[in-house]
Image: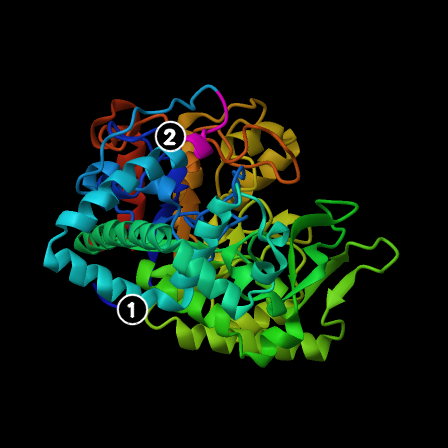
Amino acid sequence: MPRPSPYDRCAGFVVPLFSLRSGRDAGIGEILDLVPLVKWAASFGQRVVQLLPITETVPGEASPYNALSAFAIDPLYLSLHAVPHAPSVVPIDGDTGPLPRSAIRAAKLEALAEAFDTFQSTGRSAARKRLGTFLDTNRDWLDDYALYQALKESFGASAWEEWPEALKRREPQALAQAAARLAARIEFFRYVQWQAAEQWQRVRRAAAAQAVRLMGDLPFVIGRDSADVWARQDEFDPTCSVGAPPDDFSESGQSWNLPMYNWPRVRATNFAWWRRRAQHAATLYDLFRIDHIIGFFRSYAIPHDPARPRGFVPAAEPEQQQQGEAFLSAVIEASGDAVPIAEDLGTVPDWVRATLHRRGIPGYKVFRWERANGTFCDPRTYDQLSVATTGTHDTGTLVEWWRGLAPADRTAALAALGIAANVESPTLAAAVYSRIIASLYEAGSALVILPIQDLFGWPDRINVPDTPSNQNWNWRMPVSVEQLADAPELRAATAALRQAAVATGRTRES
């Protein structure tokens, strides 16, 4: 498959990996569920399948943006049926409440431990050679991750800041002693990541065979209790959390309860950790979204001491520009053939978007928010170097948004799309819904990537920001990946989507 370009006209959809379901899953979407998914995507002209972050999350955390590692694939996504000698696990039902991530992860790790023991005694030389290559290629992050996991397990899952001082401060002698004492578990956690990488490369080959591009998502920062923060403590500021200033969406601003970067130190490393993240992303994806791009120009620091003022770091615009430019240079250089895409939503200065455009990095055009003087913009006017969409994982679905609009706003939205229809009903007629999606495909944007719910008029949303709702990050598709191609309720929509992709030059058969 040729190297992707941000100017290639493509259509696709975004779906969280946890949302997939199959006849063999253990209660959550799994890596190899993507193989039939990409084949199905190609069948109706979709050339991009985007995922939310797949990295391992902090224990007890549902949000994929609160990660325990910036690199490690979450073991709960492994397809056990493809791991040699791994016993199957009884599926754990999460359809009636929050996804039982901790229970699924524990069950899979137990099964993987049995597979690892067998591999240790009977593993073939070819497999051992592949494992060795994986270890050599990923040692710079994998060794810290595996040791962190083994230590965390030995201390009853307590946060690294609660460990003995010598380990907390990473004193070399203490680390060496721990590595020797926990050698077997360290090797196990390395093995699990190798199995995940093997399965992921199988997905990449399947996607390439269908001319479908995989798109990933790199969170802006990582969980405080993570392997990376433990290993790179000097690159984070323990006195602050990062967040967002007050805006139209939050009168008081938002604290994300995630660690603030120590920007002077990060700059001194020439963004080494982020370079490695971009390099690693390029082994997993053809394109990747960089979350909260404004944060690399200026981050909003929220001190833990309420007496200290909140504010942007760096504070002055010239320093913000310099830092953002340096970050973009580092990421572009490290990305290789993969295409970075910037999440530039919210309150973002015009000069940031101008910088992204000059560097050839697409931003986002969310139809419901794209307005000029209060009027919805015609998607055909969107810049070519952009991603057009109907919403994000943090917004309501198209169905939900329409239901909440006043009739006057419905009229204005349809007028921008050149559609005349009844706007009194909170329910969109199927024909009108199809025309709305087709109009998005006509956007000037090279990329059109819609939430999978909006392709089919499903009402379920992924996340309601700043809420503890048990429904966040738990939605699963109503159709299994094995049934997608033959599901009668999807045929009309997939036929219309294929027609729209062909008509607008967004599929290879155009």
The residue located at (65%, 30%) in the rendering is 406
Query: Hey, what amino acid is under mark 1?
Result: Asp
Confirm whether residue 288 shows in the render. no
State whether residue 201 is above or below residue 360. Answer: above
> Residue placed farthest to the right in the image?
307
Q: Nearer the viewer, residue 451 or 309?
A: 309
Horizontal side of residue 498 vs 164, given as left or right: left
User: Which image quarter is the N terminus in?
Assistant: bottom left
Confirm whether residue 69 shows in the render. yes
Horizontal side of residue 151 vs 323, given as left or right: left
State whether residue 52 is above or below residue 404. Answer: below
Q: Which residue is mark 2?
A: 477
State whether residue 91 is above or below residue 201. Answer: above
Instruction: Please tell me whether mark 2 sits on a helix, a strand or a loop.
Output: loop
| Res. 488 mark | none
Quarter-of-image position of residue 337: bottom left
Query: Hey, what amino acid is under mark 2?
Result: Met
Q: Is residue 101 magenta?
A: yes
Residue mark closest to the camera, 1 vs 2: 1
The magenta segment is 97-104
Q: Which residue is mark 1?
A: 136
Q: Nearer the viewer, residue 434 or 23?
A: 23
The residue located at (79%, 46%) in the rendering is 252
